[in-house]
Image (tube, grey):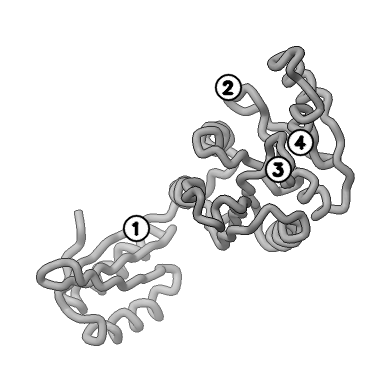
Amino acid sequence: MSTAAVIIIGNEILSGKFSDENAPFLIARLRALGCDLGRIVVIPDDPQTIAHEVRACSAQFDHVFTTGGVGPTHDDVTIPSIALAFDVPVVRHPALEAILRRKLGDACNDAALRMAEVPDGAELWWDGEVRFPLVVMRNVAIFPGVPALLRLKFDAVAHRYQGVPILTARVWTLRTEPEIADALTDAARDWPGVAIGSYPRFELTPHKVLLTLESRDAEALDQCTQRVIEQVDGSREA
């Protein structure tokens, strides 16, 4: 089992100028891969804040994904902030510089070359058919904030994060949460490897409660689900 944290970087997200599309995508993809997401945080384009969050998440989780702040403008401060987090200098990577000069020609100015800068010691991942590699510093993968580019780059490297997928069963019941609470407590005690969630759905008529049961152990999941169905007069969603 591997763990992950997602750090969304950008004043534009915190101010509401743009809605974040990257966290929902990463939640779904990491879930499908079997990588347990333990933290999502949205922070401003502030070097000290970024460095603090990256340093803390890098120490706590197996994988860290940052999004945003890697362009050529003054507010793109993710790269130097990650360098600050690991107490290393920022260097210009010759392979990235060559790509930019080849692509931009005479338009490749100092601002554009900021996109060739990486924290000293960073790796370049060339997986898939990406035109520009993913920059990875230790266990921190540095993604662009543009959703289409992030998705392209993540899908190219997703195989590196493959784990044991989580299996899910969904059970519906017409009984109320107070009526089923003891049954769920007993099931959670008897199958500690199965995570049980209870979610009332008041928008439905009649009102129903959706139960989700999740585990990497198929046998335990089936046994626990059967018990819950019997105890709450539930029906398993096909």
The location of residue 163, given as percent across then percent down, is 53, 48
- Say which of marks 4 and 3 sits in front: 3
Q: Is residue 187 left or right of residue 105?
A: left
What amino acid type is highlighted by mark number 1? Answer: Thr
Q: What label does residue 129 carry, if any?
A: 2
Q: Earlier in the sequence, mark 4 or mark 1?
A: 4
Residue at position x 62%, y 41% from top?
Answer: 143
In 3D space, how far apart are the residues under numbered discs 3 and 2 (Cα atoms)? 25 Å
Q: Mark 3 highlights which residue?
A: 76
Q: What label does residue 168 carry, if any?
A: 1
What amino acid type is highlighted by mark number 3? Answer: Asp
In 3D space, how far apart are the residues under numbered discs 4 and 2 (Cα atoms)? 17 Å
Give the image quarter of residue 237.
bottom left
Q: Secondary structure at mark 2?
A: loop
Q: Secondary structure at mark 4?
A: strand
In 3D space, how far apart are the residues under numbered discs 4 and 1 (Cα atoms)? 36 Å
What amino acid type is highlighted by mark number 4? Answer: Glu
Q: Mark 4 highlights which residue?
A: 123
Q: What label does residue 111 carry, if any?
A: none
The local crowd at label 4, few if under 14, some if 14 to 19, many if 20 or more residues have their Cα within 10 Å, is: some
The location of residue 195, given as percent across then percent down, is 41, 69
